[in-house]
Image: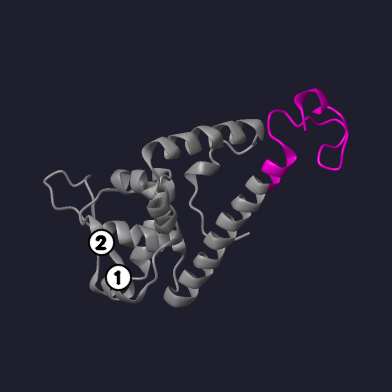
C-alpha cells in the first residue's frame, strides 16, 4: 500500500487511523512476534512457579545473587531493571522463605550485603532459568547494532502508545496476565 493511500479506510486501517509508515502486514507480524515473546515469558513464569514455588522475579534475583554474592539492593535493582523499593519487597519475600540473607559486614551498618542461603542454593540447583534471564540472554546474543535498532524501535512504539504507566518498565514481569 502506498503512503498516498495510507489515510483511506480498510479492514487493516479503520476510519480515524493512519497506516503511517508501517504496512499492515508488517504491523501484524510485529504483533504476532510480541505475542510469541509475551506468551513464552508467561509460560516460562508459570513453569518457574510450579517448579520452585517462587515467582520468576524472585528466581531471577536469586540467580543474580548467586552469580555475584554480596550485592547491595541498589546493585541488584540495576541488574533486575526495577526500582529499589520493588527489589526490597522482593527480597523481603525471599528472606521470609529463608532463601537469602542480609548481612551488614562493614563498619557502616547501613550497608547491607545480600547472599543466597543453602536453601536458596538447593532451590537454584533444581530451578529452570528465570524468564527475564532468558530474555536478557537472547537480547545479549543479538549483534550490538541490531540490539540498538530494536531499542530505538521499541522506544518509538512505547511513545506512540501514549502509555499512562510511564514506570511500568520498572516493575518486574511475572508472567501474569
Is label 1 in a helix, a strand or a loop? helix
Residue farthest toward the left in the current orientation of the protein: 107
Q: Which residues are magenta?
A: 1-28
- Residue at 61% from the left image edge and 35% from the top image edge: 157
Is label 2 in a helix, a strand or a loop? helix
Q: Work out whether 175 lies above or below 23.
A: below
Q: Residue 107 in the image: x percent, y percent? A: 11, 46
> Secondary structure of the magenta portion, mostly?
loop
In the rendered view, does 23 fall on the left or right side of 119?
A: right
Q: Residue 126 in the image: x percent, y percent? A: 34, 77
Q: Residue 11 in the image: x percent, y percent? A: 86, 43
Asked if residue 89 is among those painted magenta in the image, a careful observer would answer no
Residues marked 1 and 2 touching at CB (< 8 Å): yes
- Residue at 55% from the left image edge and 34% from the top image edge: 153
Instruction: Return the residue at label 1.
Output: 120
Q: Work out whether 157 lies above or below 99.
A: above
Distance between mark 1 and mark 2 Cα atoms = 9 Å
Q: Nearer the viewer, residue 43 or 169?
A: 43
In the rendered view, does 177 fall on the left or right side of 137?
A: right
- Ranked by sequence position, the earlier of labels 1 and 2 is 2
- Residue at 33% from the left image edge and 62% from the top image edge: 62
Q: Residue 141 in the image: x percent, y percent? A: 37, 49
Q: Work out whether 139 lies above or below 15.
A: below
Residue 22, disc:
none
For the N terminus, the image quarter is top right
Residue farthest toward the front in the current orientation of the protein: 2
Q: Nearer the viewer, residue 107 or 47?
A: 47
Residue 66, disc:
2
Amino acid at each position: 500500500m502506498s503512503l498516498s493511500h495510507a489515510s483511506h479506510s480498510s479492514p487493516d486501517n479503520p476510519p480515524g487511523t493512519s497506516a503511517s509508515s508501517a504496512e499492515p502486514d508488517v504491523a501484524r507480524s510485529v504483533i504476532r512476534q510480541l505475542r510469541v515473546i509475551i506468551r513464552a515469558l508467561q509460560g516460562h513464569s508459570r513453569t518457574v512457579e510450579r517448579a520452585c514455588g517462587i515467582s520468576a522475579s524472585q528466581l531471577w534475583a536469586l540467580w543474580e545473587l548467586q552469580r555475584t554474592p554480596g550485592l547491595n539492593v541498589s546493585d541488584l535493582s540495576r541488574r533486575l531493571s526495577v526500582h529499589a523499593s520493588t527489589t526490597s519487597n522482593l527480597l523481603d519475600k525471599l528472606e521470609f522463605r529463608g532463601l537469602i540473607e542480609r548481612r551488614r559486614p562493614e563498619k557502616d551498618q547501613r550497608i547491607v550485603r545480600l547472599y543466597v542461603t543453602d536453601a536458596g542454593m538447593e532451590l537454584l540447583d533444581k530451578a529452570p532459568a528465570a524468564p527475564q534471564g532468558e530474555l536478557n540472554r537472547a537480547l545479549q546474543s543479538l549483534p550490538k547494532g541490531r540490539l540498538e535498532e530494536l531499542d530505538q524501535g521499541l522506544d518509538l512504539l512505547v511513545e506512540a502508545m501514549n502509555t499512562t504507566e510511564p514506570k511500568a518498565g520498572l516493575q518486574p514481569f511475572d508472567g501474569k496476565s
